[in-house]
Image (tube, helix red, strand yellow):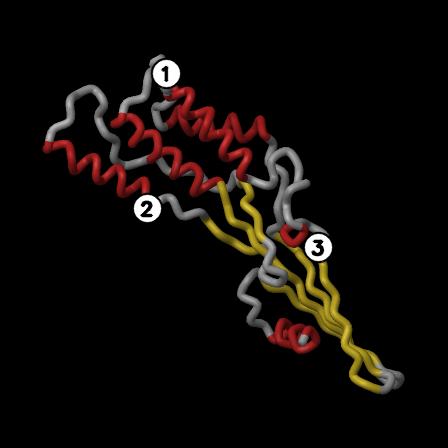
Amino acid sequence: MDISLTYGDLKTQVLNLIKNGCCNVDNLNNAPGGIKSGWARTVTKNSGGNSACYGTVSVNGGNASIAYSTDISNNFDSYMTTCGINAKSSQVITYRGMINFLSCAYRYISKRCVLLSNEDNGEWGVVFEFSGTPSTPSVTVQESFVATAVDIPDYLAALAECFAKTQINKRSVSLAYSYSCSSSSSSSSSSSSSSSNCSSSMFIAYMSLDN
């Protein structure tokens, strides 16, 4: 039996892959604790006698937030309209059309799906984000004619753009560091925050407690 694949079929499959691959769709149940708001870790180090130092690192921004399935569907559908895909949802997809579709899909995924990580505990998850606008391909392959050698450069250019956009965006949650030391005669404390580079003197002080 001959089974034909339409643009609409392919749209549905890609949308399902996006929703199943992101850990923040409709809830955060599948998101690692290290990329959620409220995550924190404390270290205690006794210095001998009556003195002790305490260090805390916590998420203070850039954490995973819920992306609702309906909003994702509407956003994806709007982008597919911009790419000209929705106008031919019921059409059977061609090899040339597949190149155009993949080029659009890769651009969308690379913008919307983000690898979010916690650099303190190493936890990570892929989250869907609405920030920014996915670009559309600058090169499309004409589907209305038989391909010839003259068209090959367009094919190669479209595929090159497609593959260039396959790398997912990456970022880290913002972390706040704090420490305090106390003894029977005196005490001191301090705090700081860092987005991802963890190069502050506060981070060094915290790590000295953690080792």
Helix, strand or loop under label 2: helix
Kind of residue at disc 3:
Trp
Residue beneath label 1, please?
Answer: 3
Kind of residue at disc 1:
Ile
Front residue of this view, candidates 75 and 19: 19
The crowd level at tag 2 (other Cα within 10 Å; few <14, some 14-19, many 20+) is few
In the rendered view of the protein, which quadrant contains the N terminus? top left
Kind of residue at disc 2:
Ala
Front residue of this view, candidates 64 and 21: 21
Q: Which residue is farthest front?
A: 1
Q: CA distance from mark 1 to mark 2?
A: 31 Å
Helix, strand or loop under label 3: loop
Q: Residue 152: x percent and y percent?
A: 16, 35
The crowd level at tag 1 (other Cα within 10 Å; few <14, some 14-19, many 20+) is few
Mark 1 touching mark 3, by CB under 8 A?
no
Mark before the other along the chain sequence, 2 or 3:
3
Q: Residue 74: x percent and y percent?
A: 51, 26
Report if residue 187 is visible in the image.
no
Q: Is residue 137 above or below residue 207?
A: above
Mark before the other along the chain sequence, 1 or 2:
1
- Give residue 179's quadrant in the image: bottom right
Q: CA distance from mark 1 to mark 3?
A: 49 Å
Q: What residue is rendered at 68% in x and 40% in y?
A: 29
Q: Is residue 89 left or right of residue 181?
A: left
Q: Is residue 6 above or below residue 189?
A: above
Q: What residue is rendered at 64% in x and 64% in y?
A: 193
- Give residue 117's quadrant in the image: bottom right
Residue beneath label 2, please?
Answer: 164
Q: What residue is rendered at 20% in x and 19% in y?
A: 144
Nearest-to-viewer mark from 1 and 3: 1
The crowd level at tag 3 (other Cα within 10 Å; few <14, some 14-19, many 20+) is some
Residue beneath label 3, please?
Answer: 39
